[in-house]
Image: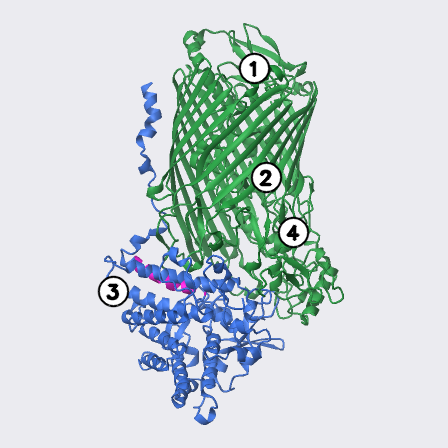
Amino acid sequence: MKRILLFLLLPVILMSCDEFLEIEPNTSELDTELVFQNDNTAIAALEGVFHQLQENGFASGNIQSVTFIGNILADDAIDYNNTDERYDFYTNSLRADNGTNYNIWSSAYKQLYNVNALLEGITDNVDLSETTRNRIKGETKFIRAYIYYYLVHLYDEVPLVLSTDYHVNKSLPRTFISEIYTQIQKDLEEALVYLPEDYVHSEGEHIRPTKYAAYTLLARLALWKENYTQAVNYASEVITSGKYELLTLDEVFKANSRESIWQLIPVVPNTGANEGNLFILENNPNAPYNRSSQTFTEDFLSIWDADDLRYQNWIGVYTEGDENYYYPFKYKIKNGGDSEEYSMVMRFAELYLIRAEAYAKSGSPQLALDDLNAIRNRAGLANWTMADISDIEQAVLDERRRELFSEWGHRWLDLRRFEKIDEVLGQKKPTWKPHAKLLPIPEQDILRNPFLTQNPGY
Amino acid sequence: MKTFTFWLVTYLKYSLILAMLFSSIGSLYAQDHRVSGTVSHEGTPLLGASIMIKDTQRGTTSDMDGYFELQTQDDDVLVVSYLGYKTKEISIQGRTTIHIELTADADMLDAVEITGGYYSLDERTMTGNVTKIDTDQLEQQVVHSPLEALQGRVAGLEVQTRSGLSGQAPLVTLRGQSSLRGIMANLPLYIIDGVQIDNAEISSLTQLYSGTGIDPLVTLDPSLIESIEVLKDADATAIYGSRGANGVIIINTKRGQTGKTKFELQAETGVSWVGKFMKLMNTDEYLEMRREAFENDGVEPTESNAPDLLLWDQNRYTDWQKELIGGNAEFQKYQASVSGGNEQTSFLLSGGFQKETTVFLGDFGFQSNNLLANINHQSLDNKLQLNTSINYGYRKSNLFDAGIFVNNGIRLAPNAPNLFDENGNVNWELDEFGNPTFDNPITGLANPNTNRIQSLQWNGSISYNFFKDLHARVNLGFNQIEYDDKQLTYKKNSNPLYMSSARSITNQRLINRSHLLVEPQLKYSLDFKNHRISSLIGTTFQKNENFNKYLRGQGYFSESQVGNIALAQEKNISMDNAIKYRYAALFGRIGYSYADKYHLNLTGRRDGSSRFGEKNRFGNFGAIGMAWEFYKEKFINENLVWLSLGKIRGSYGSSGSDQIGDYQYRNTYRTIPLHGGTLSSGGLMPSRLYNPYYHWEKNTKLELALDIGLWEDKVFLTSSWFRERTDNQLIGVDLPILTGFTSVLGNFPAMVENTGWEFILQTTPIQTSDFIWNSNLNLTLPKNRLIDFPDLENSSYASIYEIGKSLNIQKLYHYTGVDSATGKYTFEDINGDGVLNAEDQVIIADLSREFYGGWQNNFQYKNWSLSFLFEFVKQKGTDPLVSFGTAGGSYNMPAELLDRWHSSNSKGKYPAYTQNFDADYYNYITSDAIIVDASFVRMKSSSLNYHLPVNVIQNLGIQQAQAYFKAQNLFTLTPYKGFDPQYPSGLNLPSLMSVHLGVKLTL
């Protein structure tokens, strides 16, 4: 009997409850504490941010990116897909719950969480080397500034999230633009301290931000703040650095080109940069069941000088029957060639245009013209003289459109910064409404955060 | 039929006598001989009466003529029982033939024993609420899953089949939604032969199973099930503690019966089909709609934007519903079993094979096998009892990948071209420039999905009777589900436009879930004078492991290699998870009865779960149950002679839930899955917002009930009222994405209440010697309410919930019809601010069931028996229009949309056709216009059985032979226009109509 009793009770004796309930973690997860105890894992967490930026969302260059929707929001491109909610960007009649709009917003805030988590992870951290901590500090502060730069200019006032504490963040109201600008400025100035001059963190590849990326963003911001002296100074830092140059047009968008200041490496294999994959037309964009891509508007095609090499080199045409469809052809590869073209985030030519704009708006038209000519020359055009120009500011705006089209929504943001958006789009787009100059704060978040208010008109 | 439960009860009741018997009479000295006889009632032979030798597990059942044979000893006592009749004990006293006459039992329910999980109960004296469905009721139905068999049969239980595709997990909700976590978090606990089965759905690569996924019980053949018990109230579920909050469904598989070795053979064949199609436009109507849409928009139709108008045959008509889902699903099944045994050991061995096709166009289907082996043994001194069961199930599905195949397929333009070209390849109907003009739904069908599920369940128990009524017992259990799913995508099936960059792909998903369980227990019971005490104490240790792998290979040199990931040019593993879960508990129960009239039960349980952070692992749960059998009181007994049973019972207690996913309290990073061949080095990303502090969610249940039996239980009515409240809701609290994630797991002080009335009326209106009519009506009146939600208006749930309303509401715009001037939808701008947004969505529509139930009838006339079940539900649903899109696009529409606004018809019910994206349409489908009546009455199942006369078959050496016919969903009465009012939302494949024929032989 004892034998049996022992046999039956053995399991109870052998197991202690507390110990029994201890389980090993999921093999595919790593405790956050451990991530920040080791340089390799901390760097991996940092690299994850760059991967995710390219993978999906506002920075990806895919159909839900600022690049893609910026073209149809402004006067550059037509969207044929009239059965998708993306069409509402083209007609500037967005609903507040538009999914693409939410994706832009959410992809930005997700990466803000990630960079804030990295910054918190290195705070008071004695396990990581100083090199690692400094690298993380520099790159994350830059990324944070970069994300806010787009959020604030697409949506106006947005909540300023600077920590990972969801108790606080879940009910943040919108922050004044001036405060966001101050934060961007502060983050970039700190980033300048820690970012390297060269691409030492990416084995020479232009896929991580450097000091010059920070200067570029500071220069852009200075234009919005109408601080033109600053804009000139920051832009000049890059222009005179000797690290970058204007290349012949078919070289510009190549991986690690001397014109690139910061690029993102493609993460989906065999598609190369998303922009090339999406924009290059190999068939009729207006064909049934294939209305997925864009073509240029008549208006956009009318701004070119026939000798402009950019018109010849950066604009492609697909012909079917007697119809011609013009498309962005800055990236040359539709499929494959991952290592040949990277997705361009910032490039050298923009600095000339930033400086030109700053000069033009601060009463130095000749200096502005010199910078514009640098860009025009590269496009095979002769120098402009003052006699050719009636309105220098307009000349800058037009040149920006010709140089920076189909990149990062420049045209859309330029029209806003030059305060010409109503005038220009009101004329060209019959469906234009003045409130459309700001995207709606996604209703998905307004419903979940009652302190978040909507932009007027939505 | 109820061997297992009988076994348990017999064991407990007579263990003392048994011990004495065996010590005084050595079985070696007893004289063996054969006894035969008949069992009858008023001259009618009783089929299937149980004849057992008292204090043993040996016995047999009577055949068609009431005849039985049994090997006995001279001094054995036979215990003869039959549902609805008084159990009789007869001493053999050396006789060789015995005729036994049973008398109808007023206490009809005496024979219904409930295993209740850890202890067995008598339904008559029970304090809790348990509904039992036995094998007869299961066998009457055509069902793929044991859970589906409960549809309409159990008061308080909602079983919703989300599609008619075999294997789709039904949505099971017992006594209403209690958790804000959503429908899948409200599934009851499933226990098979004492071992928990993970109730989480198996998600398949083919999106045909989207929504609820594949049923984890799909490999358990309903014909192997002896009974299903549904435990509802606090008293019944408290022993399952933390996991019993949503109720418990206990499935007991069949057990061996002692007696002559019996062979059973069963063969069944049948066919299923879609019984109802929608009324859609024909070619003329469709083309008229398209032309008018272009005209309204002022757009000229061109070959590129309107191939259906300019390129395709204008006279062609195909009814795509019939073409794509109008097939017959054929069914075949063979099952064989052998059972028998002697005094010490009994066994059952059963195996089956089943084959089924689908209603889809093409050669798709399922194949499954099952095996059940069960052995029971007791030692010569009857002190040691052992039993073990193994149940293996295998199911292979050959399907395809087309998630919204049904939806896309039936919306295809009625003049769309042939699906295949002359060579049998996918037809793209190219235009002159080589552009496809056709979104061919066949591309999905041509990409095969093959998945296999294998399940193995083993359980065993050892129990030992130390002295008197002290029993020790250990339950052991192990189960494993293995799932292997392969989805192939062939380059040749891709759109010719993308052919150059398209690649063949193999996706594979591997899942392995296992549970290991050890439960040592001690039982003690004591009887003295009018007092009876029974007690139980036990512990549970449970260990789960869950492995998930996701593999992908793409790019192949030859299409014949597709399916083999090793041969792909690029391979990657995007998921490789090993998730562990452990669970430990201490539980106990004490029951006390006085004078067999007053009953009191106390249950308690302390649970620990690894799903909680270290400080919050343990939770305490308990319940009290009471019953008073007032009809046994002298003053009632004497005055109300027609009252055959009267019992008031009630219970109150708590249970909890830890269905929240694993590791949620941990702050972690995870590796970003990479595509094979990418240049990116990937990296790590945060896994979630973490909260180390969340703790058990508690659910309190209160039930009061009255059971009344009249006229010898010819009428039996159970009425129960329940109230369940769930507080401290453990939910993924919705957060704005500003926080980096859209939710965080935590306890939320919202309280959800489910109250309701349940009625079960069992009657036997007619009972003569050769005709019996039984009827069983159940009705549930549920009410689900959110009764507390602090600061709801300022929370992320403000747009979803409303205090005092059900969780299943929608907040909608108020639709005000079509503007007779513009032909556009109009809506009420409730707050008058000139903009239509969430603030105007204030109309509340409740989509929960108002009442539901089932009405079962059984008729037995001589050798014939007929039964049918009606299921009825009163509810609202969403109009199928929400799945069709804007009228005027290149998709077909319900014919009712012909009544549209046009400059010549300003009174049209629907707006002007347009081929553009119409934002108003999205407002329309979130307006009150789409809420429609989706109530229904359905003939859920019906069956007709015929037992061949014994004199005909006996010469062939056959003991019993029956032929049967069964049908499922034969007709439905409903005002709902969509496919299936049972799931009134979307365009899923509806529940199928089925007709089956079969024979069953016992040799």
Above or below, A314 against B740 in this view is below
Q: Label 2 sits on what residue type?
A: Lys
Q: Quadrant of residue A241?
A: bottom left
Q: Percent from the top left, x then y, of residue A236? A: 33, 82
Residue extent of the magenta highlight? A41-57
Please tell me whether mark 4 sits on a helix, a strand or a loop.
Answer: helix
Q: The numbered mark 4 sits on a residue in which chain?
A: B
Q: Percent from the top left, x then y, of residue B850? A: 61, 42
Q: Is B744 in front, or is B821? A: B821
Q: Which chain is blue?
A: A
Q: Label 3 sits on what residue type?
A: Thr
Q: Are the residues at dot 2 and dot 3 in contact (C-beta closer than 8 Å)?
A: no
What colour has chain B? Answer: green
Q: The numbered mark 2 sits on a residue in which chain?
A: B
The residue where tag 3 is placed is A131
Q: Are marks 2 and 3 on the same chain?
A: no
Quadrant of the snapshot with the C terminus of chain B: top right
The residue where tag 4 is placed is B324
Q: Label 4 sits on what residue type?
A: Leu
At 50% from the left and 24% from the top, the residue drawn is B121
The residue where tag 2 is placed is B355
State the residue lying farthest toward the right: B904
The residue where tag 1 is placed is B634
Eye-nearest disc, 1 or 2: 1
Q: Residues within 10 Å of mark 1 (few under 14, many from 20)?
A: few
Q: Is A78 in front, or is B906? A: B906
Quadrant of the snapshot with the N terminus of chain B: top right
In the image, residue A42 lies in the stretch drawn in magenta: yes
Q: Residues within 10 Å of mark 3 (few under 14, many from 20)?
A: few
Q: The numbered mark 3 sits on a residue in which chain?
A: A
Q: Is B58 in front, or is B589? A: B589
CA distance separating discs 4 and 3: 63 Å
